[in-house]
Image (cartoon, rainbow, N blue to C red):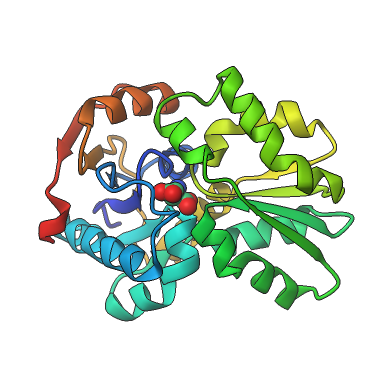
Amino acid sequence: MDSRPIGIFDSGVGGLTVVKEVMHSLVGESVVYFGDTARVPYGSKSKQTVTKFSAQIIRFLLTQDVKAIIIACNTVSSNSIEELRDMFPNIPIVEVVGPGVHMALHTTKTGVIGVVGTQATIASNKYPELLLAQDAALKVYGKACPLFVPLVEDGWADHDVAYQVVKEYLKPLLEKNIDSLILGCTHYPMLTHTIKEIVGTQVELINPAEEAAKQMGDILSKNNMSSNSINPEYKFYVSDSEEQFKKMAQIFLNKPIEHIATVPIEEY
Ligand code: DGL
């Protein structure tokens, strides 16, 4: 048994959708979460910048004695995973794109799949590339939805404005008759309610966080690194705006956030 925490990070509150899955399926594991609230969004930034920010965060998480890391961000996963694995070869890293691809392959019946994500994730072409490598007959349609992240970060996920924005962005994908939609940004599961209202029951929503948590569980148990603590700890760190993050996290995780602090992340 290894009671050290799992490190999880994202540009902001989005990675909490992964924390939620970890709390649910890896109940004995402690978590140290970092949300880069000072520098969100990542989705409109270059690969070099996203890689640099992520490396700083991983260096910070290593100071917290984490035993493994989940990159709870599709923008980082689709643009920087190879570089980050090269930079940090001694720690197990789980990302979210592979898990999303795995789930989509099992979910689709018609083979027509939609992917929504940030500009950087869609531009990387990572989802279509990995999906088509598994099955060249699939039809994969991507759509960048840059307004989703600010709507979620500001707590507007269930607002009428969110409904209009989601409807507009998803229109071209619905016209292609997709039967599965990969939520290729960890912020987007927070819009599930609104997205479901628009896509209806014909389209299956895929949240890669579920499979990412499962993959982390498999890696830990294979390496005898699991923890079955009855008192797991959850610590949260941000680079700015503790209060807004805390408010959102408490609502989303449905539990009080006892430990939150600000970290000068650019010093790492
Ligand atoms: N939640 C992140 C993702 O999965 C990043 C969103 C952003 O910062 O633009 O892509």
Q: Is 219 above or below relative to 117?
A: below
Q: Is residue 141 left or right of residue 41?
A: right
**Residue at 35% of width from left, 63% of height from top?**
50
Where residue 19 sits: x, y (%)? Answer: 41, 42
Q: Residue at x 15, y 36 (%)?
A: 261
Please indicate whether residue 86 sits to the left or right of residue 66 in the image.
Answer: right
Decide: is 89 above or below 72: below
- The quarter of the picture where residue 236 lies is top left
Placement of 138 over or under 240, stated as above or below? below
In the visual, does 256 lie left or right of 163? left
Judged from this view, the residue extending furthest toward the top is 160
Residue at screen point 65% across, 62% down: 101
What is the number of callouts on the image? 0
Q: Is residue 99 above or below residue 154?
A: below
Residue 175 location, x and y as percent? 85, 46
Image location of residue 90, percent across then percent down: 28, 76
Judge by depth and name the residue closer to the eye, 257 or 231: 257
Foreground residue among 173 and 126: 173
Q: Which quadrant would the N terminus be assigned to in this image?
A: bottom left
- Residue 259 in view: yes
* Residue 83 drawn at (x, y percent): 36, 77
Q: Which of the 4 image quadrants contains residue 255?
A: top left
Q: Is residue 96 in view?
A: no
